[in-house]
Image (spheres, rainbow, N blue to C red):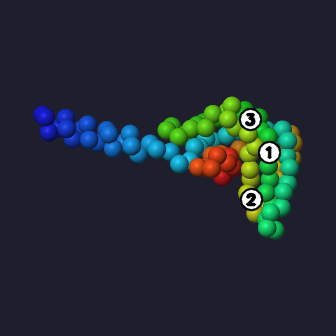
Amino acid sequence: MKKLSLIMISLFSLNISALDCSKYEAQIFGTVLESATTVDNREFNCQYKVEVEELFPHVFCSLDSFEIENNLVFDYSLSGKCLKAGESFSGYIVKDGLGIIFLD
């Protein structure tokens, strides 16, 4: 019984240390409030201010709607076509280790 308890405690402590998040994520349904396009090194980047309509955060490494709505959201798509103000969108949104929030 002691061995089983020791094994369970060891496994539990391993899972806690595995929760050190390098990225934070959520699935989002929202609306673009403001949109801007920039070109860096001949690549198009879209920047948005968004309103969150529905948010399904990651279970362990989650983003909340306050953080998303109060920061710029970047879209590094290669299409060069940015969403416009008033357009609805959905997808996954990620905050990386540098604090940049982007659509994935």
Q: Residues within 10 Å of mark 1 (few under 14, many from 20)?
A: many
- Location of the N terminus by quadrant is top left
Q: Residue furthest left?
A: 1
Closer to the chain start, of discs 1 and 3, is: 1
The x, y position of residue 79, in whole percent, is 79, 62
Cα separation, mark 1 vs mark 3, equals 11 Å
> In this figure, which residue is indicated by the disc labeled 3?
70
Which amino acid, mark 3?
Asn
Judge whether 57 appears above or below 39 on screen: above
The location of residue 35, given as percent across then percent down, is 85, 46
Q: Which residue is mark 2?
A: 77
* Amino acid marked by disc 1: Tyr
- Residue to which mark 1 is pinned: 48
Q: Residue at x 32, y 39 (%)?
A: 13
Question: What's the residue at 41%, 45% (across, down)?
Answer: 18
Q: Residue at x 85, y 54 (%)?
A: 37
The residue positioned 51% from the left and 37% from the top of the image is: 59
> Can the viewer see residue 79?
yes
Q: CA distance from mark 2 to mark 1?
A: 13 Å
